[in-house]
Image: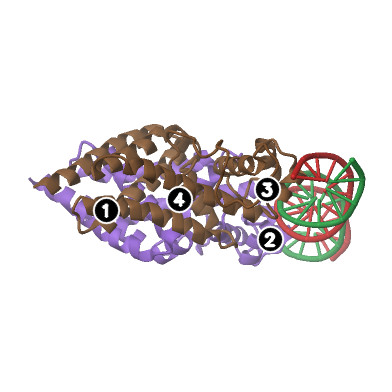
Chain colours: A purple, B brown, C green, D red
DNA sequence: GTCTATACGCCGATAGAC
DNA sequence: GTCTATCGGCGTATAGAC
């Protein structure tokens, strides 16, 4: 679960995983730990989450966690990396769509689909980034890179729509979603996300139409 | 420091304070503790902040904190109450302005003025509300009430501008600010808030103009 | 590689002297 | 009312058996 998990889980249960040196003894414990970390961090927040919570969610004995991650920080880092990979997977899927407006609307639609989760726990990535900015470790920079990757992708869509102010529009769209997540979460009202999602759809359509002129 | 602290500190160093039963022994230690709590919660987050941090910031011995607040939760509650009072004070000040559009633009201008702080620590109230939603205590409801109070005030301004969709516009404006705070904070770029602040000004002007037609 | 048992430090909270 | 000293619990991390 990342900025948007949406359809497929993919990647996760697959056998091979790039990068990781230790191929470890079957069961993919490392993978399970990362996925558990991402979920529990989202639901409880990084600071409130103990390694015991993650170990239990991943069904791995507490002490064994340290074989894969020497510190809690490394687990947080792995969680951020996971968000990054899921964002890449999402934009790859969206890039298959025929035109930029459709891609942006699909992005928004995915956010709206996750509104129940957002109402309960906020944006999986936004809340993480917010929390990392109050920590001592340098992971906030990694979070910034992921956020920037999303902004860059959105900006390129607006550029393809012929907008010279694509960067400002990208900030506007992503900020709209992040802010909606905060309100939806605080007020526990998924309806906000649905209503504003409709508005954003119309807004994107308006931009795409104005290009045709 | 609340959703917007802006101009005056007021209220704070003043002698009397409504509500508080204990008038306590001079020095206004309770007041100092609350203000320190609000600030440190903003800078470090609630979970990371220890009572020792607050005591030090307020220049009050650790053990003495418990004379004023029996638990950490009560300090968090007092911080939320403080945000609520500061919001009331802010809207009171804005209500003195002649027309609704000017009031809304002053609200946005105040947010933009705080952009350096937002870049470093996020929105003082938004980050608190986000964090409280992951806690066990029921303070998230109190935070929701404050957010709702802001939304209601903004909505009433749009209503006065003759808009039937004032509620949606209020959500749009507040979400824009909250989302901008998240991006500004994550990317450590106060410039985002300034640029989008200009856009929001123009947007408000556009709404006010369309009313004249 | 896997897991149990435990050391160590920190923080919330209390007791009680002044 | 004010402050010091300290308890008790929990969470990170480690040691070391298997």
Mark 1 belongs to chain: B
Measure the C-alpha gap from mark 2 to mark 3: 13 Å
Residue A20 seen anywhere in this rendered image of the structure: no
Q: Do pointers 3 and 4 mark residues of a single chain?
A: yes
Q: Nearer the viewer, mark 3 or mark 1?
A: 1
- Where disc 4 sits, the SS reads helix
User: What residue is rendered at 9% in x and 47% in y?
Assistant: A212
Measure the C-alpha gap from mark 2 to mark 4: 24 Å
Question: Sequence order check: which comes first, mark 2 or mark 4?
Answer: 2
Q: Nearer the viewer, mark 2 or mark 4?
A: 4
In the image, B3 versus B50, the foreground residue is B3
Does B139 sit above or below residue A170? below
Instruction: Identify the residue position indicated by label 2 in the image.
Output: A52
Q: Do pointers 1 and 2 mark residues of a single chain?
A: no
The picture places residue A105, in percent across and down from the top left corner, at 26, 56
Question: Sequence order check: which comes first, mark 3 or mark 4?
Answer: 3
Measure the C-alpha gap from mark 4 to mark 1: 23 Å
Residue A175 seen anywhere in this rendered image of the structure: yes
Q: Do pointers 4 and 1 mark residues of a single chain?
A: no
Q: Nearer the viewer, mark 2 or mark 3?
A: 2
User: What residue is rendered at 64% in x and 44% in y?
Assistant: B30
Instruction: Identify the residue position indicated by label 4 in the image.
Output: A126
Q: Are marks 3 and 4 in contact (CB under 8 Å)?
A: no
Label at residue B169: 1
Left or right of residue B212, residue A1 in this image: right
Mark 2 belongs to chain: A
User: What residue is rendered at 56% in x and 56% in y?
Assistant: A41
Q: Are marks 3 and 1 in contact (CB under 8 Å)?
A: no
């Amino acid at each position: 679960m990342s900025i948007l998990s949406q359809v497929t889980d993919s990647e996760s249960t697959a056998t091979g995983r790039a990068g990781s040196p230790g191929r470890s003894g079957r069961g993919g414990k490392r993978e399970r730990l990362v996925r558990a970390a991402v979920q529990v961090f989202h639901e409880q927040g990084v600071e409130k989450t103990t390694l015991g919570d993650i170990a239990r969610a991943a069904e791995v004995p507490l002490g064994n966690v340290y074989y894969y991650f020497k510190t809690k920080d490394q687990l947080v880092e792995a969680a951020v990396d996971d968000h990054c990979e899921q964002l890449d997977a999402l934009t790859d899927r969206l890039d298959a769509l025929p035109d930029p407006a459709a891609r942006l609307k699909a992005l928004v639609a995915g956010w709206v689909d996750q509104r129940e989760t957002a109402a309960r726990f906020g944006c999986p990535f936004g809340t993480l980034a917010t929390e990392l900015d109050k920590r001592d470790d340098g992971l906030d920079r990694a979070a910034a890179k992921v956020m920037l990757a999303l902004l860059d992708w959105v900006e390129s869509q607006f550029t393809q729509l012929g907008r010279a102010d694509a960067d400002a529009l990208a900030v506007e769209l992503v900020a709209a979603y992040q802010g909606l997540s905060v309100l939806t979460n605080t007020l526990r009202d998924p309806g906000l996300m649905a209503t504003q999602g409709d508005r954003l759809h119309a807004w994107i359509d308006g931009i795409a139409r104005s290009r045709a002129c």
